[in-house]
Amino acid sequence: MIKFLQNFSIKKKLIALQAFSSLSGLFFTTILLLVFEVTEFKHDAKQKASTMAELVGNRSTAALIFDDPTLAKENLEPLIQLASFHSACIYDSHGKVFASLNHKIRTETACPNQYSGAKTFFKQASLYVYEPIFIDSELIGTVYIFANLEQSFLRKLQSIGVLFIVLLAATVISFLLTSPLIGVITIPLNSLLNTVNKFINKKDYSLRAIKQGNDELGTLVDTFNEMIATVGQQHHALTAAKDHYQALYNDNPTMVFNLSKNRSIISVNQYGAKQLGLTCEELQGRSIFNFIHPDDKQAAQDFFYSCISMPKKVHKHEIRKICKNGQIIWVRESARVIINENEQYNFLLVCEDITETRLLSKKLAYQASHDSLTGLVNRNQFDKFLKLILEKAHNDQSEHVLCYLDLDQFKVVNDTSGHLAGDALLRQLGNVLRKQIRSGDVLARLGGDEFGIIMSHCSLNEAYQACEKLRNTIRGFQFAWEDRSFFIGVSIGLSSINNHSGNAVEILKEADSACYAAKENGRNRIHVFNPDDEELASRRGEMQWIEKIQHAIAKNQFILYGQRIVPTSDTEEGLHFETLIRYQDKQGNIIPPGAFLPAAERYNLAPALDKWVINNLFNCLSNYKDDLQHLSLCSVNLSGLSLSDESMLDFINNAFNKYSIPPEKICFEITETAAISNLNYASKFITLLRAKGCSFSLDDFGCGLSSFAYLKNLPVDFLKIDGLFVKDIIEDPVDRAMVKSIDEVGHIMNKKTIAEFVENDQIFNQLKDLGVDYAQGYEIAKPIPLKELLTTALSPQTFY
Amino acid sequence: MKKTGFHKKSRLFLLISSLTALLFLSAQPFAQDKSNEYKIKAGYLYNFTKFIYWPDNESATFNLCIVGDDPFGSIINPIEKRTVNNKPIRLHRFQTITKKTHCHLIYFSGQAEKLIKKDNSFPTNSSAPSLTVGESDQFIKANGMISFFLSAGKVKLRINLASLKKSGLTVSAKLLEVSDIYEGKSND
């Protein structure tokens, strides 16, 4: 009942309550009335009948005692007047009927013949009265009256019915009168409810309920209004915070996924959805594996398993994802397991797009392992391959071959047609070589014009034949640049990679040495490394020089020498010499520069060596400051690399300042190839130092296939004619003509000439005849330690 | 005291049983049997005491006097176990009325009816009235108060109301209702 009422409106409840209380009141009143009236009625009837019976009995005492039934019957007569009367009797003391009276019509209920000793009782609407008759406490008889009260009863009920109807009418009227009072409660309540509904529909926090009284409902309205105000404020604060965090979540430049335990997407931020090319809603419920690159799916599976197995750890890996448009992006995924409110685990997955980084690192990795010019594997990567194949050889006794290729006439192309030509040649040659090698072999560019090939699973014999083919191919390759064409050759050194091989550096050295040997043997040939090969023994030392040179520079293990240069004429000129360098080993042996200078040039140590020479020379000269008037000119060599070393100019200027050396006493010697290969910079270098007062000489002039045309652009003061022409000048008329023409051109260009390799007087005289200005050579003066030279030449006592 | 209580109880029992016997007899229509008739009459004598108001007097007992030949014999003896106004009934049998005993009720038998006086006054040491009962019309006529007569085999009563009133005794109307009232003139 109460449950049934619960869903009613309050108005209906109040009406029900009122109706229920009224009706229950009416009901109980009616019941009570009925019970009371019936009881009262019965009691009255019984009382009345009993009194009657008592009267009759009292009157009949004498009749009973003196045996007068007629009188007794007369005494009963008045009872007939009773409406409900049916029959009456008087029994004597033995219970026998003494006198009886029956209703004239209602004869069916005559009194029983024998009194059984019963007491007065009601049976339904029938009343049976038994009234004993006493005299002096002696029972002398009993009066019996039987009355049927049915009619009276009905009348009683009728009157109760009328009363009930009156009560009902009164209840209904009072109900109708009080009903409007319900509105006192329901109207303010409905007003509040309307406001609440409006608030819910419109979410308008400025809404306020109207207070209609100061009762509990009024308090409720006040409380509600306060609550809405508070909620409004909190809503604003929450909205702001939500927007803030939503922006943080959605616009965060990472993809943030919440995944269910079966890896389907529960939620994703907008940035993530945008990256994948779908909306957040479209992504919901789809498996994350739909967006993982097929090759990475297993890795992703493993990744999630590791997340589950170590739930406290944040797991990271990099993986490819596929967007809707098929684009593949690289992401770095960070994930961990989170336990949700239902005690089930989810995955929190954050993906950072690292595609660009990946591409860049891939490019860098490629660049790190490849030569940018030819696209071939570079030295670094080649070393790695070499180590791998060496390991393999050690492991399975397999045999492989390392080939070291050095182009023969590359320098010519570079020097005469420029770097662009050289680069083009290398590129074309790279392609040619690439086509020649087997697919499993590794071809790399190891240096300027040097290439390496690792021929795997190959005997020396087979390699030799393959290299022969390569050599022929290169020989037959014609390189055309502008209107010129070049033929080049290649020197190839072979070294076996087998079980007995040393480390990768040693193998590389062997191949390099073999290549060098091939060059030494006349270029464009193939040489297989032989450990017993004596000619290679010295060559093998070149690499060892790298460390020695560096060490010697630091520890000043070089010694400066000087060799006089003398004029062919008899004029006095003071001391003129070329500064030379020697290495003194630990045993005190003096090693000539031919042993280490190529290594210095090759391994880019020449500028450092040049700086050491300049520094020490100037230092040495500064000790003879007062005698420098006796010094005519001191020449010092500058390597080609030093010319292009940007710090060299500053270094020289500083050295001049530091040691206060007059620049006009110093002449820098440069080779024509060094000058020509970097003509512009060399010109600038020369011009700047000449402006200070220094002079320049062009070393080894004539051997480098150089053209006289360059001389116009090189503001040098001396030409040093290459010793190759000079030494055979007596026997060879061509050489003599060459020297002569160089000398003439030099003179025409206002340059003085110096001849090298002057080994005897005949040559000296010949040169003198030819008009060469200076001579230098063993015959004239051998190189001697600089200090010795300066001491003897500059001191006045030993004035030359 | 206990003994006295016991006696009272046993006496009550006897009383009830004898009364029941009396009433039974009275209710039984009797034949020409004289003893039955006198049983009823004896009962009636006792019953009169209930419908007559007796003025109080100094006598400690209720004296029932049978004057003349005793027609009851021993039948009436149990009446002595009963009381009237808490006074035990005592039977007295006289041939004539004596001065010694005051009789509350005098039953005149046979020839003794002649002893009735017109004013119903008898030699006695008490001023209290006496109820006089006889058996013939002459008795009533001679100012006797109550007489028995037989009608349809039943013992009936006839009352000389004037005589009764004159004596100073009060009679219950109930008794009058069951009796035949003698309207004859009073002889005073």
Image: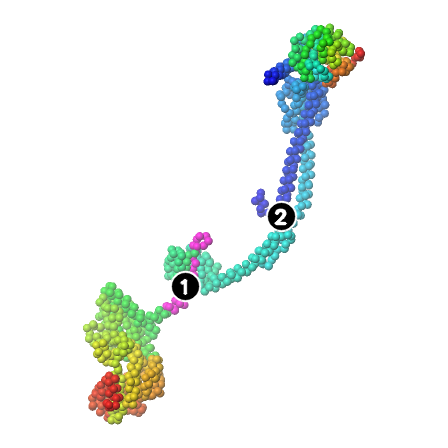
**Residue A402 as seen in the image, left or right of residue A63:** left
Report whether mark 1 lies on the same chain as mark 2: yes
Q: Residue A553: horizontal and vertical position, in percent? A: 28, 78
Residue matched to label 1:
A331
Residue matched to label 2:
A11
Residue A195's quadrant in the figure?
bottom right
Q: Is residue A278 visible?
A: no
Seen at 29% across and 91% down, the residue is: A747
Judged from the image, the secondary structure of the residue bearing numbered disc 1 is strand
First to last magenta residue range: A339-362
Residue A588's tag is none
Q: Write down the chain letter for disc 1.
A: A
Identify residue type, mark 1.
Val
Please state which of residues A682 and A48 is positioned toward the viewer in this rendering.
A48
Q: Is residue B116 visible?
A: yes
Please state which of residues A516 and A326 is positioned toward the viewer in this rendering.
A516
Height in image: A164 above or below A223?
above
Seen at 26% across and 65% down, the residue is: A392
